[in-house]
Image: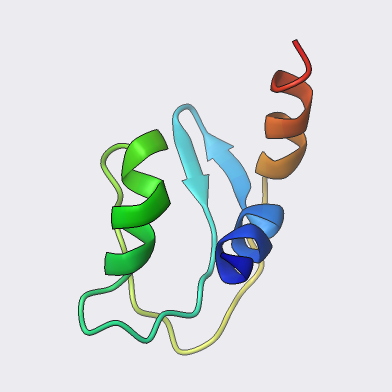
Amino acid sequence: GAEIVSSMKQAKITGPDTIEWFETCYCPSPLKHERETVYDKYLVEIETNLVEERGAIEGDSFWSFLENHSKT
């Protein structure tokens, strides 16, 4: 719950149909729980990559996009 919200608040739109974010996950299969409960209901073609540390992601705020498109 809280980790998903925190991750989405930091997510960036980096290209057409592309969102990038960092998320801490302790599952043997990366994002297994998150995908089953939330992500697979809204996102397609999810690709995960293991990183040692978070870097900067350039792009527009995905959270702002969600806020702007949920007020219709």
- Residue 20 visible: yes
- Seen from this angle, which residue lies furthest top? 72
Position above or below: 2 against 40:
below
Position above or below: 12 against 65:
below
Q: How is the image coloured?
A: rainbow
Toward the viewer: 1 or 27? 1
Spot occupied by residue 59 in the image (x, y as percentages of width and height): 67, 44
* Residue 33 position by quadrant: bottom left
Spot occupied by residue 27 in the image (x, y as percentages of width and height): 29, 82
Q: Quadrant of the C terminus?
A: top right
Spot occupied by residue 15 in the image (x, y as percentages of width and height): 52, 34
Spot occupied by residue 67 in the image (x, y as percentages of width and height): 76, 31
62 relative to 46 in the view: left or right: right
Count all numbered tags in the image, as a single digit. 0
Toward the viewer: 69 or 13? 69
- Residue 43 visible: no
* Residue 13 position by quadrant: top right
Q: Quadrant of the N terminus?
A: bottom right
Position above or below: 38 against 70:
below
Image point 63% across, 48% down: which residue? 12
37 relative to 8 in the view: left or right: left
Image point 71% across, 43% down: which residue? 63
* Residue 50 position by quadrant: bottom left
Toward the viewer: 17 or 43? 43
Image point 68% across, 32% down: which residue? 66
Position above or below: 1 against 39:
below
61 relative to 36 in the view: left or right: right
